[in-house]
Amino acid sequence: MNAEIKELIDELFEKHILSKEGFRKLIDQRDEEAAEYLFEKARLVQKQVFGNTVYIRGIVEFSSYCKSNCLYCGIRRDNLKAQRYRLSEEDILACCRQGHDFGFRTFVLQSGEDLFYTDEMLCHLIRSIKKEMPDSAVTLSIGEKTREQYQMYYDAGADRYLLRHETASPALYAKLHPADQTLVNRMRCLQDLKEIGYQVGAGMMIQPPGQKTEDLVADLYYLKDLQPDMIGIGPFIPHHDTPFRNEPAGSSELSLYMIGILRLMFPKALLPATTALGTIDQKGREKGILAGANVIMPNLSPKAVRGKYLLYNNKICTGEDASLCSACISNRMRSIGYETVISRGDAPGKMPHF
Ligand code: 5AD
Ligand code: FES
């Protein structure tokens, strides 16, 4: 590690921001020793804010139908080989109930952009979950909608919304998406969600085709501006039935390094050690926590459909059932000295809305 990198990490630790040039150097000139130093600092902050606890959020992937066509994604509209399924409200409730029995108090309802579910159906679903499990937070991750729709779901009781910005660089965004999916609309969605009062999650992929260091710096500056409650990042992983089938996967090494940077920038943010990180590296999620992450999002979907929600190749946990994943996560966290917690785990300082 050169002296300048150490100074940059110290500066980031103290001021939570660097100049664009500083971030560029911090990323481009990294080596193993720099990463170790960064992770040490990130763990210091993580321990101060969250102790040795890791929050668990159960994800229910309730539909694999999608009208969007992101070039990287295995459930994109044009992938005619993708297996499509939809869960009914009763199916979804059963998954949440099972998670609740494990002690989970946050349910993330995620799907492709599927117009089969009307706003009325979604609001009914949200109300049903909140009625049966009033001590739980409901998180939606169902893509780009109008402000009015976001407001309806919020009024029905949804607490949080995850919508990764994917990349804050307009040129890169255009390479990863068809022309009718714009970064402007993506950012409009995130702004609306914040203004309505949701706890918001954003985030980017690490090393999708064509990503440069300056694109990552743009992501960091966008996040600084947005101040999301959660930031989900993970390596790009190719999917065999997409236009990016032959592109190389992003590295776990850079993904972990970016988690370390994010922890120093956003001491209180919820940073998940993502499934993509666990897929690219067998110990990726453990390493993610040790780099500063503090959330894990195990799958609560029924076993019968897990193998059909494939955004990328070799996704983990597609053969396990929910109870197995829940126990597996606790064991994995215990093995590195962390305990899983079953509370709602609101971002520190955020009032839950009931
Ligand atoms: N590799 C890694 N992450 C992906 N996602 C979608 N496709 C891929 C892929 N091939 C991520 C996107 C999306 C989230 C649900 O999954 O960032 O927002
Ligand atoms: Fe699913 Fe380990 S988390 S098997």
Image: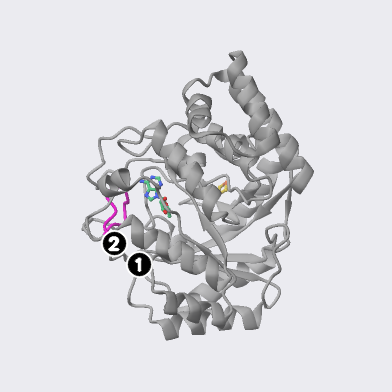
Q: Which mark is residue 210?
A: none
* Magenta run includes residue 72: yes
> Mark 2–mark 1 contact, CB under 8 Å?
yes
| Amino acid identity at mark 2 | Ser
Which residue: 54% across, 18% down? 31
For mark 1, give the secondary structure. loop
Q: Which mark is residue 113?
A: 1
| Amino acid identity at mark 1 | Glu
Which residue: 26% across, 40% down? 245
Label 1 beta carbon less than 8 Å to ligand 1: no
Which residue: 31% across, 37% down? 209
Magenta region, main secondary structure: loop
Q: Is residue 75 left or right of residue 28?
A: left
Residue 64 in percent (x, y) is at 36, 63
Please say whether residue 104 is visible from this viewpoint: yes
Part of the protein shown in magenta: 68-76
The residue at which mark 2 appears reads as 68
- Front-most of residues 321 and 50: 50
**Which quadrant of the structure image shows residue 43?**
top right
